[in-house]
């Protein structure tokens, strides 16, 4: 794990920001629930005063999402046991609609549900995500390792 995380050091212009990145990644791996930054603080027994520092990490100019994404692709290529078919790696793609209560959140739109379950509403307000993963492992046990995920629709305002 140290080798994989160390590869991300070049993505950060400040050492402290990289160290918080490592803390956040370890916290996400060990978390007991999905309540956000407070979960990381609670599960890693961090001082509650670190809340603002963790929030600031996500808005820091010391790193870019693009550099993290490119480094992640390099780490996966170097470390993961990639599955291949006729010499080509196998990519897996999927989309997901996530219902949201708020209607004024970025990317929230009225979405049609394709479910055959009659107990679900025909339309929901939510976000549409798209993801690409790569198949790793062996024929006895395969896993899909996420490579990239983003909002697929309703993000013109965000990007503008």
Image: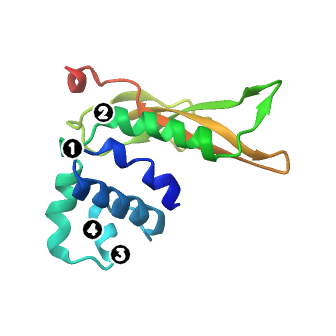
- Mark 3 or mark 4: which comes first in sequence? 4
Direction from residue 149 to residue 58 in the image, left or right: left
Q: Position of residue 23 (x, y in %)?
A: 35, 64
Q: Position of residue 143 (x, y in %)?
A: 69, 47
Residue 147 in sight from this viewpoint? no
Q: Of 70 and 151, which appears nearest the observer?
A: 70
How far apart are the two marked residues, 4 and 2, measured between alpha carbons? 24 Å
Q: Nearer the viewer, mark 1 or mark 2?
A: 1
Helix, strand or loop at mark 3: loop
Tell me if mark 1 has few (under 14), some (14-19) or many (20+) residues whose alpha carbon lies within 10 angstroms of its own. some
Q: Nearer the viewer, mark 3 or mark 2?
A: 3
- Mark 1 or mark 4: which comes first in sequence? 4
Helix, strand or loop at mark 4: helix
Which residue is drawn at the image coordinates 36% and 35% (left, top)?
Answer: 67
Q: Which residue is mark 1?
A: 62
- Mark 4 or mark 2: which comes first in sequence? 4
How far apart are the two marked residues, 1 and 2, measured between alpha carbons? 29 Å
39, above or below 3, in the image? below
Q: Which residue is mark 2?
A: 108
Q: Which residue is mark 3?
A: 44
């Amino acid at each position: 794990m140290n080798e994989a995380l160390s590869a991300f050091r070049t993505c950060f212009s400040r050492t402290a920001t990289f160290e918080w990145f490592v803390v956040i990644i370890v916290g996400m791996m060990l978390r007991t629930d999905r309540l956000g930054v407070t979960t990381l603080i609670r599960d890693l027994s961090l001082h509650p005063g670190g809340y603002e520092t963790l929030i600031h990490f996500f808005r820091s100019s010391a790193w870019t999402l693009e550099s993290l994404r490119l480094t992640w692709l390099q780490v996966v290529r170097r470390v993961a046991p990639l599955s291949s078919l006729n010499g080509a790696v196998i990519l897996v793609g999927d989309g997901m609609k996530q219902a949201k209560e708020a209607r004024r959140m970025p990317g929230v739109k009225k979405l049609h549900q394709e479910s055959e379950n009659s107990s679900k509403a025909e339309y929901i307000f939510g976000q549409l995500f798209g993801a690409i993963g790569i198949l790793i492992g062996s024929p006895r046990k395969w896993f899909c390792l996420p490579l990239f995920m983003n909002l697929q629709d309703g993000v013109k305002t965000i990007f503008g």
